[in-house]
Image (cartoon, helix red, strand yellow):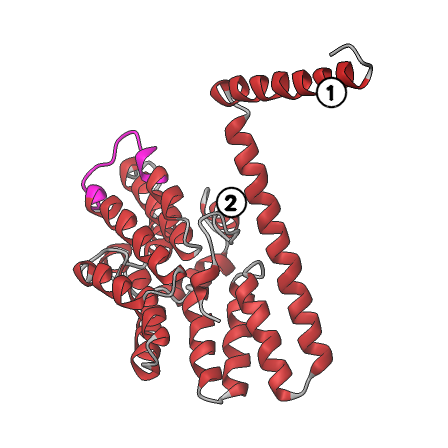
Amino acid sequence: MTDGDVNDSNGGPAGDARRETDQAANGAADGAADAAVAAAAGGLTWRELLAARRFGVARHAYLIEAAAQPAGTSSDDLTRTALSALADVEDLVRERSYGKAKTRIERLEVRGSLAPWEAIMADLDALAVTAKALDKREPEEALAGLEPLAGSWLIAEVMTQRGTAQIYQGELAAAQENFAGALEIDPQHYRALTNLGNVALEEGRVDDAIEFYERAIKLNDQFANAHHNLGVAYRRKGHLSKSVRSLRKAQRVAQRHETAQARESISQWSGARGSKYVKWVVYAVIGVVLIWFLRSQGYL
């Protein structure tokens, strides 16, 4: 029911929305994109948004501010690069891809001083551990691991995990408060939205749960848990056809994620090191087949 079933390779919206925004922002973003970012920013500057840990919106605001500068004014490439990395990390953390988020930071050639990169990477490692504790339904262990992360730059994820642990402990009011707090920092956090739906469903507020799940799906149509839980909510409402459609959608999305994970694993084995092991596996299979054939023909 909670977000604990999502793994590190879970597909998500990471990169897609930002690529679209990049095209708009590079070379003076169009008016609609500017208005959307301004609305999301709430009148805050990119520095204020960064301080609020709203990395994606901070990056977009920076690009628009840079594009509005007088001709001949150069933007700070280091700031642009750092904000892009933070926005990527934000996306990857939403989908619980903590290892990929850490790799994204490690790929920065020059990190600069815009963010405490080493501390963020340490927090990513800690969040990966607490996520595994949640997957094992061990909320006490997760909460103990989350306690030192109260001041983390990834506080929206910390609050989301804390709320998940509190659901397991039956502390629904505290869980709801954490999920709502996470969404104040990161309104795009579809897992926090899904878990708000889970709280509502546990409390019998089925209509509210459906609304939360539908909002989460609008943010990420490839989040299987939201589709599955929406199907459960529809079933409680007696809307069986809608329930079946949502559950089938959840199954298809989950299968796509499993396929993507398998392909990623294969690609990791297809490199120089992997090909060496694959070669020996192939030789072994050929040897077994050859021995079987010779024995079947009476030669061995």
Q: Which residue is at the front of the view, 46 or 97?
A: 97
Q: Looking at the picture, does residue 210 appear above or below residue 191?
A: below
Tell me where residue 209 appears, x and y as whole percent.
Answer: 51, 81
Answer above or below: position of 161 versus 281. Answer: below
Residue 65 position in % (x across, y down): 34, 51
Q: Which mark is residue 292?
A: 1
Q: Residue at x 46, y 63 (%)?
A: 36
For label 2, count other residues whose C-alpha is less than 10 Å away and answer few (under 14), some (14-19) or many (20+).
few
Residue 23 is labelled as: 2
> Total of numbered circles in the picture?
2
Q: Is residue 112 magenta-colored? A: yes
Label 2, secondary structure: give it. helix
Q: Is residue 146 left or right of residue 179?
A: left
The three-letter code of the residue at mark 2 reads: Gln
Is 82 on the left-hand or right-hand side of 212? Answer: left
Q: Is residue 42 visible?
A: no
Residue range highlighted in magenta: 104-118
Viewer can see residue 251: yes
